Every structure is written in C-alpha cells, then in structure tokens.
Amino acid sequence: MSFPDDLDYGVEDESTGINHPHDDDEEGDEDDTQPRILLMGLRRSGKSSIQKVVFHKMSPNETLFLESTNQVHKDDLSGVSFVNFQIWDFPGQVDFFDPTFDDEMIFAGAGALIFVIDAQDDYVEALVRLHTTVSRAYRVNPAIHFEVFIHKVDGLSDDHKIETQRDVHQRANDDLGDGGLDKLHLSFYLTSIYDHSIFEAFSKVVQKLLPQLPTLENLLNILISHSGIEKAFLFDVVSKIYIATDSSAVDMQSYELCCDMIDVVIDVSCIYGPMEDGGAYDKESLAIIKLNNTTVLYLKEITRFLAGLTPHTWRANKQKPSGRFWNTPALYDRRNVNLLTRAGFPDDGRA
Ligand SMILES: Nc1nc2c(ncn2[C@@H]2O[C@H](COP(=O)(O)OP(=O)(O)OP(=O)(O)O)[C@@H](O)[C@H]2O)c(=O)[nH]1
C-alpha cells in the first residue's frame, strides 16, 4: 500500500501561517467539501507524529526527527483509505486572536476537532488553549465532535495516567462551565504513538463521523450470532483504524492482534504476492492465523479498503465456530458486501 507524497497543501497566508486551498484550483475546491478532522494543540504536543504514525506508517521512533509544522498541512486520504476525510494538522503557534484567522473557513466544515495535550509536560497552558479553541469552534459549528487526546502517556505510570485524565477532565469541564458552555461535550482519550492506543482513539473519533455505523454494527452482530465466533472487526487496512465492531466489548489484546495480523498479511503479500498488478491487498486477500494459545485470527477482504477480522479463542466449554463461518460467514457474503456498498461504501466495481 502506498500513499501520495505530492499532496496539495494550498497557499500559505504569511500573516497567519494558515494555509488556504487554491481558489483557482478546481481539485482544491472539490477537496474542501470533504469532511475534516482538525488536529490542534500546543507546539510539540505530538500532532504531526499522530498523523504520520496513523496514516503514513511512520514508525514512532522516526517522529523524533519531525520538524515543527509552520503551516496547516491538509492531508487528503480519499483514494488510499476508507477514511474519506481530510486531516488538517495545525502548527502549534496558531494565533487565534489574529484578525485574519478565519474561524468560518476553519471550523464550518469540520467534523471533529482533536485537541492534543502533552501529558508529560505541565498542561496548564494547554488547558487554556483548549478552552479558547473549543469555545471559538463551538460558536461557529456546535455540531463538531470535540475530542481531547491526553497524549504521550507512555511515560506515565498507570496511577499517574488515571490521575492525569481525572484532573484534565475536571479542569477542562470547570472552565467550560465557568464560560457558560455546559452543553459543549468533550471526550477524553489516553494516547501514545508507542502502542495501539492512538489507533484505538482515532477509531472512535472516525466512527462518530460515519453515518453507516449502525448498519455495520448490526451486520457484525448478525455475523457473531450466526457463526459462534467471539468478535468481529471491520478494519480500514491502510490506517488500521477499526471502522466498526459488534456490540460486545473491545478487548485491547484482540484489537492489537488484528492490527498485527494486517501488517503480517500485507508484508507477506508484498514479498510473495503476484508482482503484475502491484497490489498487496486485493479481492483474493484472505488469511487464517492459528496461534498456539488456541486463538484463531481470520482476515478477509471486504472492499478495496476494508478487511473483516474475526479473532476467536476456542475454549473447552465453548462452542466451536460453525462450518459456515469458515466458508461463507454473513458479513463476507457477496450479498452483504452489496449491502455495504449500497449503504455508501466505496464501490470498487467488483461487489
Ligand atoms: N514519548 C512520546 N513522545 C511522542 C509521542 N508523540 C509524539 N512524541 C514526540 O513529541 C515530539 C513532537 O512531536 P510533533 O509531532 O512534531 O509535535 P507537533 O505537535 O506536531 O509540533 P508542532 O509542529 O511544533 O506544532 C517528537 O519528538 C515526537 O517524537 C508519544 O506518544 N510519546
């Protein structure tokens, strides 16, 4: 899988450092109609690292060498990922009080605003900036989902993590209450690029923006109930974000296993797959991995961007998955793929 390197980042407004799309560029205008996820936060909080690790397969250690962002980077993911959004990565030093800062242009089309707080640093200033940012955005667009990533928690003990989350939650909501913004809802996540928590958090952010989510959850519940398997995920292969899962609780270990399986399948396919079409992931993609702890992982292509993954652990007192599961499980049935396509999924012309 590859990503476009030549993304169009528009023209920088020198007075604000904000990067505007080309007005005379038809493609740029078209891109602007896509829903946006905004990444904001203080300098060095980790915004660019998050974007690079989740969507560009950068390894966490490489982010140490990332340079500070000086203008808004618009990352267009359509065509490479199911996540048909633009991710706008803002520089940490954006001055919201600059009169040329165009709230309407930035916030009106945004689906989610992710505010990143460095948990390894003193976060008092970050909380002030969080309050300014969300209150300005809310005034323009109250429908935005406000997501707070309490980030870099890899350096914190478990107790410290919980205490930091409680403290940030309390202070941020107190500030909103004092400002008369009680209706503004903030969601909090503990994240780090050094484990799967950043993918898990991004999954939840993206799911809130998907109108098809209830249909997908329903289909996955049907798959679970008809096959006897434990858990089913629908993954965006490129980003390893899960787009939907059945309604049983997500266990972090199964999620991590599924992420690792996607990497294994793509790597093996890149090395041993047919060279002619150059694709590491196509309609033939299917893999079963049996682990020695009786867990079985099953991956199957659903559409060009999506994989169904079903981790299952056989236990003596548990029913084995039915034969149908291995042959034609409900979600993988072409008729249901058709249903997904009709529900607004990108049609790759094969379903
Ligand atoms: N320990 C740890 N370090 C992180 C994590 N995420 C990012 N970093 C580090 O934080 C530093 C700053 O990361 P950037 O992604 O450049 O931060 P930014 O918010 O984009 O910074 P600006 O562009 O200046 O606004 C880098 O050295 C990253 O390696 C994390 O989850 N854990």
Image: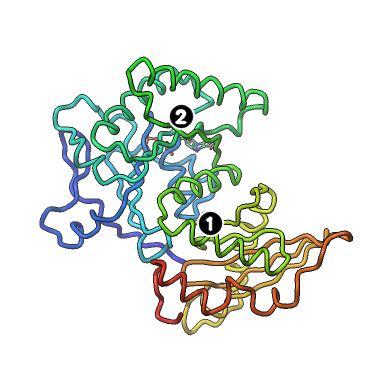
Give the quadrant of residue 125.
top left
Q: Which residue appears farthest toward the top when viewing the image?
A: 178
Q: Are marks 2 and 1 in contact (CB under 8 Å)?
A: no
Please tell me which residue is depicted at 19% across the width and 50% down the height of the picture: 21
- Residue 100 location in percent, x, y? 14, 32
Pick the residue in front: 23 or 63: 23
Judge the density around disc 1: few (<14), some (14-19), many (≥20) Cα neighbours within 10 Å: many
**Element class at badge 1:** strand
Residue sitting at the far bottom: 276
Identify the amino acid type marked 1.
Ala
x and y percent of residue 267 in the render?
Answer: 59, 67
User: What's the CA distance linking mark 2 and mark 1?
Assistant: 26 Å
Which residue is depicted at the point 46% across and 42% down? Answer: 49
Amino acid type for the residue under numbered disc 2: Ile
The residue wearing badge 1 is 244
> From the viewer's perspective, is residue 138 above or below residue 170?
below
Rate crowding at label 2 as few (under 14), some (14 to 19) or many (20 or more) other CA atoms within 10 Å: many
Mark number, residue 117: 2
